[in-house]
Amino acid sequence: MIKAINNNRYFKFFQPKLFYINQDINNDDPVRLLSAILEEMDFSNLLQVFPNKTKVHPVNMFAVIIYAYSRGIYSTRDIEYLCKDSQRAQYLLNSSNIPDYSAIARFLSKANNIIYELFCQFVEKLLKLSEITTETIYIDGTKIEAYANKYSFVWKKSTLKYKERLEENILQLIEEFNKYFNKELDSIFDILSFLEELKIHKIYGRGKRKSKEQLFLEKIKSQNIEVKNVVADAGYESLSNYEYLKINSYVSYIKPIYYEKSKTRKYKKDLNRVENLEYNEEENRLFRKDGLELKFLYYGKDKKTIYFRNPETEKKVRYNYKFRKLSKESKDNIESEFGKQLRMNRSIQVEGAFAVLKEDMKLRKLKVRGKESTKREIGLFCIAYNFNRYLAKLVRKKQGVILHPLKIA
């Protein structure tokens, strides 16, 4: 029997060693990719928010938070635990002290107004890498619960407190009104009676307000981003949107509201449907496909809508030639090969993005309150989503692929 020999004369269970964390992380690890992207970003505005020395450098703190969000970790306490437990998080901290949850919360609170700018820089980086393009923009919307309060009922004490504040605000408004008009009115009802005497009435209706789509495109234009094609669902179809796209030289790929029904035989054979009528612009005459002419009645207030009467059904027909013309152009666009590809990619890239954010990343309810905090939280989620998407493209070796190809049956 051979006796085992141990040549280690000195042994201690926790023997101290020189440890360099950088060597234990692979070159293709996500944290190396994230740090490479962040190194090319400009953090001057972020550093102005933190002029004094902090426990953790602001850029390192931002990197750790983005990494945590990309891994589905959003609570400040969970991020603190990640910094203590994860070797990758410690690599991003770059040998800084482990931040506690209160330090992370303070950083997020102070960086409220900087996150959107950093998100824009992250998108510009992806543009330079040719991973996204601004030639085509997809517009869609989703609902995320705004308030972090899990209770649906209202507390009696808070209601009474808000009522007192409201009454104080009303008294202040009455005082300002009396100063402006040099009156001594005591109630809102007296003010309403006085305004009626002056023939001042409240105007109802939308007026000239811009739609969400128009406001969104103007925000894109303010970032010096050139957009050519606008792809949207049927919920965005309106004359106002069509005219806005036409004036600004955008190509419309908006799906008409009636598009799915228009494929049915019943729809195509219905001669009285407005979409199946034929309009003669020069003579201002409206015909059915069988040659029956509808009788002209009058123009609408907007001078764009024309009213006719159907002699067969004796029903009034409301017809807007400009809307029908622009709607048909959009319909022809989405039925082209390129239009079909864009519609398919809208379903994948927009609805798919919302699915990942809400289902995989659990963004169904925001954990913060207030407009600025909400914008910050959405910005962090979007940066993390874009990073994960870019990482997935690298793993699948699909760099530079922007549009998914149509599948040919």
Image (cartoon, rainbow, N blue to C red):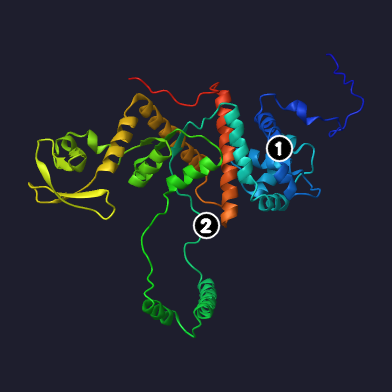
For the C terminus, which image quadrant? top left
Q: Nearer the viewer, residue 14 or 162?
A: 162
Residue most toward the left?
312
Identified at 77% across, 26% down, the residue is 23
Please state the horizontal and vertical placement of residue 30, each as a whole percent of the image. Answer: 65, 30
Identify the residue shown where x is 79% and y is 48%. 54
Q: Is residue 274 left or right of residue 33?
A: left
Secondary structure found at label 2? loop
Can you identify the residue that label 2 sits on?
Answer: 147
Any part of residue 71 in sight: no
Foreground residue among 279 and 169: 279
User: Taking 92 as reference, is 216 above or below it?
Assistant: below
Crowdedness near tag 1: few (<14), some (14–19) or many (≥20) residues, C-alpha within 10 Å: many
Kind of residue at disc 2: Tyr
Q: Position of residue 247 (x, y in %)?
A: 40, 40
- Name which quarter of the figure residue 399 lies in: top right
The kind of secondary structure element at disc 1 is helix
Q: Is residue 107 above or below residue 27?
A: below
How packed is label 2: few (under 14 Cα within 10 Å), some, or many (20 or more)?
Answer: some
Tell whether 78 sits left or right of 50: left
Q: Report the front residue among 68 and 120.
A: 120
251 in relation to 172, above or below: above
Work out whether mark 2 precedes mark 1 in sequence or the reverse, and give the earlier one. Answer: 1
Where's the N terminus, which quadrant?
A: top right
Rendering coords of residue 160 (x, y %): 52, 76
CA separation, marks 2 and 1? 30 Å
Which residue is labeled 1 in the image?
Answer: 89
Q: Is residue 403 visible?
A: yes
Under mark 1, the amino acid is Ala
Task: Give percent across and percent down for residue 35.
Answer: 69, 32
| Closer to viewer: mark 2 or mark 1 | 2
